[in-house]
Image (cartoon, grey):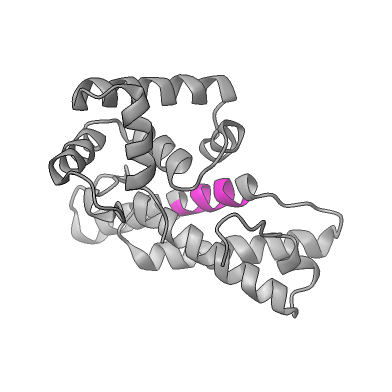
């Protein structure tokens, strides 16, 4: 399937029995699942959050057929639900095992997919540098370079202003530039290669 294809999320709710709806659902299930894996390794929570966010949206569309759902709204709804489920799971484990677990999801370097052959040391250096960013900075970089989101979409997903998104991304890229000692014109293409989709 062409990665540049436009996927109409609303087909899932307006024509749920159509082949288009099935294709769109499979597409966004995979995208949300991959995004969720960047936030937590708990696949059960990810699957529950995806299922429940689609149920919630289907119910909302049933009440108001004029609703128009876009990609950034889908991602932000999923992100909020996953974070809530993650926090609830942490609290439950704390009660049951009386152990301390961090409720801040972390990105894992082994989740970043590299498809093209480049200098291996440079790849390792960039991946290590990504791990030195804050979780918010890594999430913004992921949404920009893996999901190909625009800044207004990233702002909606992360629940911050567009201006704050630009600042967050600028700080992240500036830190990466200093950590890997690469000029922007080399760093940005390398990031796109690191995050390129299969």
Q: What residue lies at 20% left-to-right and 47% top-to-bottom?
A: 100
Q: Quadrant of residue 182?
A: top left
- Residue drawn at point x = 74 percent, y = 60 percent: 10
Secondary structure mostly seen in magenta is helix
Looking at this view, name the residue that lies furthest to the left.
Answer: 121
Relative vertical location of residue 100 with respect to residue 30 in this rendering, above or below: above
Residue range of the region highlighted in magenta in the rendering:
74-82
Residue 194 x/y as whole percent: 32, 46
User: In which quadrant of the rendered image does the N terminus lie?
Assistant: bottom right
Residue 191 location, quadrant: top left
Relative image position of residue 33 (x, y in whole percent): 44, 62
Residue 172 position, x and y percent, is: 35, 26
Asked if residue 129 lies left or right of residue 187, the reply is: left
Residue 24 lies, in percent from the top left, at: 64, 67
Based on the picture, tell me whether residue 6 belongs to the magenta stretch: no
Total numbered badges shown on the rendered structure: 0
Q: Is residue 44 left or right of residue 179?
A: right
- Indicate yes or no whether the magenta region holds residue 77: yes
Q: Residue at x 71, y 79 (%)?
A: 19
Which residue is found at the position 36% from the left and 66% from the top? Answer: 43
The residue lying toward the viewer, choosing from 119 and 147, is: 119
Q: Quadrant of the C terminus?
A: bottom left
Asked whether, in this view, residue 101 is left or right of residue 166, the answer is left
The quadrant where residue 124 appears: top left
């Amino acid at each position: 399937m062409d990665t540049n294809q436009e996927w109409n999320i609303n087909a899932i709710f307006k024509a749920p029995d159509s082949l288009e709806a099935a294709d769109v659902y499979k597409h966004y299930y995979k995208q949300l699942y991959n995004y969720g894996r960047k936030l937590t390794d708990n696949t059960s929570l990810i699957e529950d959050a995806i299922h429940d966010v689609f149920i919630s949206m289907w119910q909302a569309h049933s009440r108001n057929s004029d609703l128009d759902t876009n990609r950034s709204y889908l991602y932000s709804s999923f992100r909020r639900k996953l974070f809530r489920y993650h926090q609830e799971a942490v609290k439950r484990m704390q009660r049951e095992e009386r152990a301390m677990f961090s409720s801040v999801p972390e990105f894992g370097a082994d989740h970043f997919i590299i498809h093209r052959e480049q200098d291996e040391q440079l790849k390792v250096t960039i991946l290590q540098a990504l791990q030195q960013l804050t979780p918010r900075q890594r999430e913004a970089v992921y949404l920009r370079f893996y999901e190909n989101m625009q800044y207004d979409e990233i702002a909606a997903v992360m629940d911050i202003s567009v201006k704050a998104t630009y600042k967050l991304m600028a700080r992240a890229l500036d830190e990466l530039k200093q950590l890997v000692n690469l000029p922007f014109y080399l760093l940005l293409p390398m990031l796109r290669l690191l995050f390129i989709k299969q």
